[in-house]
Image: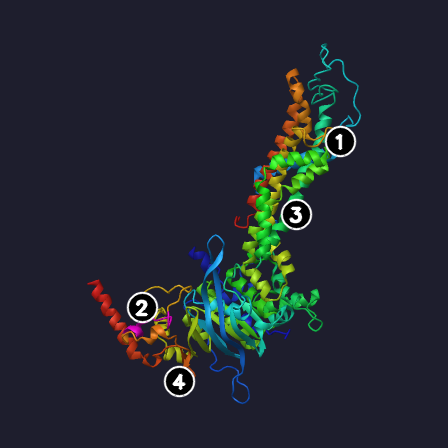
Amino acid sequence: MDQRSSLTPPPALEEIEAAVGSTDYEVSLVSLNQWQLAWRRFKRHRLAVFGSILFLTICAIAVIGPFIIPFDFYTIPEPLKFCVGSTVLRAASGCPPSINHILGTTGGLQRDLLTLVVNGARLSLTIGIGASATAAILGTIVGGVAGYFGGWLDNILMRIVDVMLSLPLLFVILVVAKFLGGGNWFVVMLVFAVFGWQGIARLVRSLFLSLRSEVFVDAARAVGVNDRRIIFRHILPNAVSPIIVAMTLSVASVIVGEAFVSFLGFGVDITQPTWGNILSNSLSFIPLGNWWWPLFPGLAIVFTVLGINFMGDGLRDALDPRSRD
Amino acid sequence: MDQISSQAAAQAAATPGTVATPAAGLEPAAPAAAVSGDGQAEVLLDARNLKKYFPIYGGILRRVVGQVYAVDDVSLQIYRGETFGLVGESGCGKTTFGRTVIRLEKATAGSVSLDGQDVLALNDRDLRRMRRRMQIIFQDPYGSLNPRMPVSDIIGEGLLAQADAENQWGKRSVRDKRVGDYLEAVGLRREYSRRYPHEFSGGQRQRIGIARALALDPEFVVCDEPVSALDVSIQSQILNVLSELRREFHLTLLFIAHNLSVVQYFCQRVGVMYLGTLVEVASVEQLYATPRHPYTVALLSAIPLPDPRIRKKRLVLKGDVPSPANPPSGCRFHTRCWLYEKLGRPENCVTVEPALRDVGGGQQAACHYAEYVNPSAVQEATAAQDAVATAAAD
């Protein structure tokens, strides 16, 4: 140690300063913004990465699947008399998974289950994502206005939220979806959006309330920045992370909710397949031994919800500004 | 004004070795404020009977059940070019006063004028224009920068808001140049404008906050405890930067602090606040040599000495600061006043609120018995307190 220091004398402070440039020694090599940092944290969350891959795969299947699979949804096949490897007449109860129909066929019309599940993915996901995104936008607007402007406006908006949250949600959805929608998926999606924004509104309101009193907002006000810019450049960007997390998790619950409503026969009708109404139709064939019909759309729901929840969990950790790496 | 000789600031900034007391390495403040030709100092900021009450809500109906008298009838003049220190304990209303003066808080009553213009009466448009002339540097270097914004936007945003045909700040290139200039003025590098706040240390962040305030070329800047959240070694750097910049830009500062030794070196005049009222105003020399309000005496006696071997006899105030929602009658300080005890509890201390009055040499104090405050009285009070303490210990 002694030897080394005698070989290379430590540079004087002035030399270091001259080399580094007057004041600052902390020079990080890459400059990362908050989103890049969040992405770095997200990548380290293995379950979240797994969940995202699962969810994105299902989304990809929903988008391109119908073009790849051999059967068209709108052409109803010739009813099979015999199933593969069987001499028993099973036309009524459908065929179990086989080479031709890898997820089996439905009872009755003997439709290919793979075709149904893949086509069902489109609507189930569209309804889930669409309703959640619409709810998030509605909730952000209402919560943002209430939280930022406060006063009587806040009072009125929050009382509306309270009233809507106190309604027996499922019952209202069943009634409204049936009588307004008549089985149209777009109406079902809107119903879930209209009854899904209250939680996000409360969240956004509380975020706006606390961000409004941040010092950097005062600082912006002190230099003459107007309300609009304060909302869109200072408050909203800092509120976006929790909104994204809440929205992601609500996609899962809307998918389950839609499946439930359709299962009860109050949602989307059978001409437009969703995982829920596929399940619903399988009901009377379960006693005939057709286990594959309810199983595969059920699994599709389970995997989708699981993937979304893992992803949402990871997002929550990654986007939390308090978590440091 | 675009051309900033950043040399001086950079030099001031480059003192990482300076530790010890926060004021170390600072030259004493210039004795006199900018004085116009006829020897008469010009008032830049004039606050008259300023009041700021915060309502307390209670009950299920959230009705107003009381008020916190954060700033209660404070009148104060700050002269052009001077640095006015405002000191007092936490919660005495000094920060609220600073914020109310530049209209970050809405005043309950009173008036504030900057260079003759009534600040509190301005409409939105005129207020925005006025914001260019009055700025603020915040205490918290972490909370005062938006974590989602790069430095170029943090500093440039004020320029954008204040852009007009004359200054051309609406143009990106003009703005970016000015942001770079001011980063250099506070001792940072131009290239830092692309970075985000989390990449900077506390001292660097505070420099960014200073650059943001000064980029608008203000005349009057409220410094709300700009160094109290920083390490002692960094404090002196930031004070040096501020000291250089106030000279270069001819700034008038309202320097809010609770560290009296910083104020001594940095300010020309000082106001002392207690429970929302101004109890003494004096030049730094007068205040530290001959304090005339019993509270100021106690405050000065609490200054820590940098030498741990010296045992100092302190004048310790008994009790806690009373609630600003329910301040004592008469003189607000009488519940803790050593002079009140020493003079045998005179009645007017409890019944009559003392006004700020001239006690000689331009020094003002809000005490009925300011003339009784002198070194021997203080010594006696300290001794008496000591005796009580010893007796209690026995």
Q: How many marks?
A: 4
Q: Chain of mark 4?
A: B
| Same subunit: marks 3 and 2 | no
Amino acid type, mark 3: Ile
| Same subunit: marks 2 and 4 | yes
Q: Quadrant of the N terminus of chain B?
A: bottom right
| Same subunit: marks 3 and 1 | yes
Amino acid type, mark 1: Pro
Rendered view: A35 above or below B92: above
Residue drawn at (45%, 70%), measured in percent from left and top? Answer: B72
Front-lying residue, B128 or B122: B122
Tell me the magenta residue range: B329-341
Residue topped by disc 4: B360
Residue topped by disc 3: A137
Outermost residue, left direction? B394
Residue drawn at (68%, 72%), measured in percent from left and top? Answer: B167
Tag nearer the camera, 3 or 1: 3
Distance, label 3 to label 2, CA atoms, is 58 Å
Amino acid type, mark 2: Val
Distance, label 1 to label 4, CA atoms, is 93 Å
Q: Earlier in the sequence, mark 3 or mark 1?
A: 1
Residue A124, percent from left and from top: 68, 34
The quarter of the displayed image where residue B314 is located:
bottom left
Q: Is residue A150 something one can see in this rendering?
A: no
Rendered view: A39 above or below B27: above
